[in-house]
């Protein structure tokens, strides 16, 4: 299971993605009433939600922690995760790694199709094959 620390915009976007991909996750926020709590509830993203003071047992069964930008690396929960050798990642690095995995599949699927009008669906993007080289260079 993955743990999302922070229920702001970053936590919301990661929770939406995990739910859409049927990835097991829980969300946690040190605040009793995070500003986006109603959105998490309305979208069914808060089924496994921990609010308020973090305890070390929050890390039980956690394979990876996605840390929102507003969470200090000096927070006890982050330190505990490091001590337990649980990988800590930010949302950008998580999605980058995930897209790079898809990119390898995409390259294999499109390498023999040189048509300039070929459109490729990649993650949330749809690009022409000519633009694909520019995206590769960017990543």
Image (cartoon, rainbow, N blue to C red):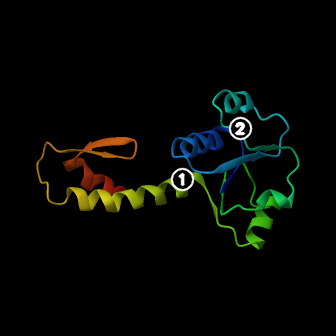
The image shows residue 82, relative to residue 70, as above or below, that is below
The residues bearing labels 1 and 2 have C-alpha atoms spaced at a distance of: 22 Å
Image spot of residue 128 (x, y percent): 22, 44
- Residue corresponding to mark 2: 46
Query: In this image, 58 relative to 123: left or right?
Result: right
Query: Residue placed at 72% from the left, 27% from the top?
Result: 38
Check residue 10 in the rendering and tell me which mark sits there, or answer none: none
Query: Residue placed at 38% from the left, 57% from the top?
Result: 102
Give the total of numbered labels: 2
The image shows residue 34, relative to residue 87, as above or below, that is above
Image spot of residue 15 (x, y percent): 61, 43
Q: Earlier in the sequence, mark 1 or mark 2?
A: 2
- Residue corresponding to mark 1: 92
Query: Residue placed at 12% from the left, 54% from the top?
Result: 114
Query: In this image, 25 relative to 19: left or right?
Result: right
Q: Nearer the viewer, residue 131 or 119?
A: 119
Q: Residues within 10 Å of mark 2 (few under 14, many from 20)?
A: many
Q: Residues within 10 Å of mark 1 (few under 14, many from 20)?
A: some
Image spot of residue 24 (x, y percent): 62, 51
């Amino acid at each position: 299971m993955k743990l999302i620390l922070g229920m702001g915009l970053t936590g919301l976007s990661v929770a939406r993605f995990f739910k859409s991909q049927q990835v097991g996750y829980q969300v946690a926020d040190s605040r009793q009433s995070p500003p986006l709590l109603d959105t998490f509830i309305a979208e069914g993203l808060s089924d496994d939600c921990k609010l308020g003071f973090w305890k070390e047992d929050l890390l039980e069964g956690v394979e990876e922690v996605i840390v929102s930008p507003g969470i200090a690396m000096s927070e006890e929960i982050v330190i505990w995760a490091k001590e337990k050798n649980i990988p800590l990642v930010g949302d950008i690095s998580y999605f980058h790694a995930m897209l790079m995995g898809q990119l390898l599949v995409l390259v294999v699927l499109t390498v023999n199709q040189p048509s300039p009008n070929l459109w490729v669906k990649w993650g949330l993007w749809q690009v022409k094959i000519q633009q694909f080289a520019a995206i590769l260079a960017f990543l």
